[in-house]
Amino acid sequence: MKVLQTIYIEVLGDLRELDKLLLEFNRIYRDFIPCRDWLECRLALAEGFTNAVRHAHKNIPPEITIEIEVLLRRNYLEIRIWDYGSAFNLQEFIVKTARKHNSWLSSGRGIPLLNKIADRLDYQRTKQNRNCLLIIKRFSDHRSKNTTTEQKNICMDI
């Protein structure tokens, strides 16, 4: 499927960069994206970035950047987040946290949340000794043909 738009975002490995990241991410929004799907994509990006900063870049200076690539296609969005931390086994982590099933955990809920949002969630170590988290979110068929300005503003303001 044809890529409609691609954006690249590079931010410091610092949680204070999250607002900047989300503002840049908003550039890719289009009216045909259902609001709920858009908000889930924003949440997935925020969660993926937060995990990269808190875990992958935990012992790495914040000047070392985290890179994000977003590809918009007609029916879905692809988000790739590259970090320089140690690799981990994503599927094993998902299985392990599913067994705990404790909603009162102080951490460890981000990946299960990403797994629920994403239609595809993958994590690979690259040849450049970086990790790439891939999040693919397909758009639902519940699109309103007459999205109001107020609805668009709600999607963008959150």
Image: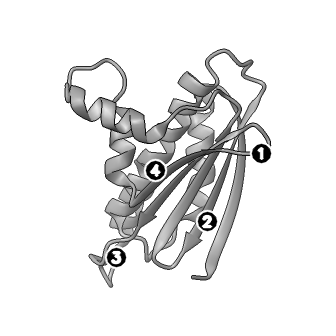
- Point out which mark residue 147 bears: 3
Q: Label 3 to label 1, Cα distance in Å? A: 44 Å
Question: Tags 1 and 4 in contact by the CB under 8 Å rule?
Answer: no
Q: Label 1 to label 4, Cα distance in Å? A: 28 Å
Among all residues in the image, which is located at the extreme top? Answer: 59
* Residue in front for this viewpoint, 57 or 146: 57
- Look at the picture and state if 143 lies above or below 151: below
Kindly identify which residue carries mark 2.
71
Kindly identify which residue carries mark 1.
127
Q: Nearer the viewer, mark 2 or mark 4?
A: 2
Residue type beneath disc 2 = Leu
Residue type beneath disc 4 = Arg
Q: Is residue 12 left or right of residue 153?
A: right
Q: Label 3 to label 2, Cα distance in Å? A: 23 Å
Picture quarter with the N terminus: bottom right
Residue type beneath disc 1 = Lys
- Look at the picture and state if 109 lies above or below 32: above
Secondary structure found at label 1: loop
Kindly identify which residue carries mark 4.
42
